[in-house]
Image (tube, rainbow, N blue to C red):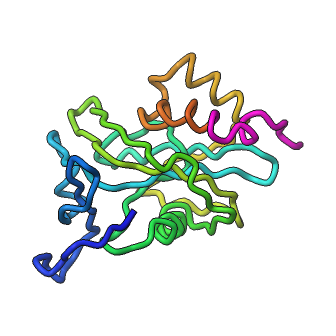
Amino acid sequence: MDTSVDTSAVPADTAELVVLLDREHRPSGVARKAEVHTRDTALHLAFSCWVFDAAGRVLLTRRALGKVAWPGVWTNAFCGHPAPGEAMADAVRRRARRELGVAVADLAVALPDFSYRAVDASGIVEHEVCPVYTAVLDGGLDPRADEVMDVAWAEPGRLLDAVAAIPFAFSPWLVEQAPLLAAARPERFTAPVIG
């Protein structure tokens, strides 16, 4: 997706910017991330990344308690927003480094058209067109405490069972993405975990 938008009206002291989208999912402007995620969140562009290790396990992260939306909730490895004009793959790699302190390999889009809208317990809304990526961990984890309070590795099949049994324990986007990702990338969810 082309994220090119006119940023001439955006102040130079730019905090993290997100790309706003119209009803047809075309870029329609930009806004500061901190101002977008409210009780009336505008549709915007994001991404979600699921990270696997060499043994076939999937990385889960628990969102830091200081997060505005879904604090303390278990979710997939990381999510983020491409900057205006930034290639989506570059944004995913940037966010992996910033949030988890890692590089990722074998980055691939698995669910290019995923989108969702969800409301957390405090009323904050997520409303995103959010392509879903898979990647393989390339190095050790060094998560930022302001983003991630805990990490865990899970067998993908057991994660699917947990999502079906106790969906309230996970982020709403993980709950929606997990079965779709398992259908799109069955080799990731049916292969035996090594070791």
Please indicate whether residue 138 sits to the left or right of residue 90 in the image: right
Q: Residue at x 64, y 30 (%)?
A: 159
- Of all residues shown, which one is farthest toward the left? 9
Towards the viewer: 75 or 130: 130
Q: Is residue 107 above or below residue 111?
A: below
- Of all residues shown, which one is farthest toward the right? 195
Please indicate whether residue 132 sits to the left or right of residue 162 in the image: left
Quadrant occupied by the C terminus = top right
Q: Residue at x 70, y 65 (%)?
A: 138
- Of all residues shown, which one is farthest toward the front? 24
Please indicate whether residue 86 sits to the left or right of residue 42 in the image: right
* Residue 153, position as x, y percentages in the image: 68, 43
Residue 189 forms part of the magenta stretch: yes
Q: How many marks on residues?
A: 0
Towards the viewer: 20 or 152: 20
Which of the 4 image quadrants contains residue 84?
bottom left
Please indicate whether residue 193 sits to the left or right of residue 188 in the image: right
Which of the 4 image quadrants contains residue 142?
bottom right
Q: Residue at x 18, y 65 (%)?
A: 29
* Residue 98, position as x, y percentages in the image: 48, 68
The magenta stretch is 182-195
Q: Is residue 27 above or below residue 50?
A: below
Towards the viewer: 30 or 170: 30
Towards the viewer: 128 or 96: 128
Q: Residue at x 54, y 44 (%)?
A: 76
Residue 191 forms part of the magenta stretch: yes
Q: Is residue 62 above or below residue 109?
A: above
Quadrant occupied by the N terminus = bottom left
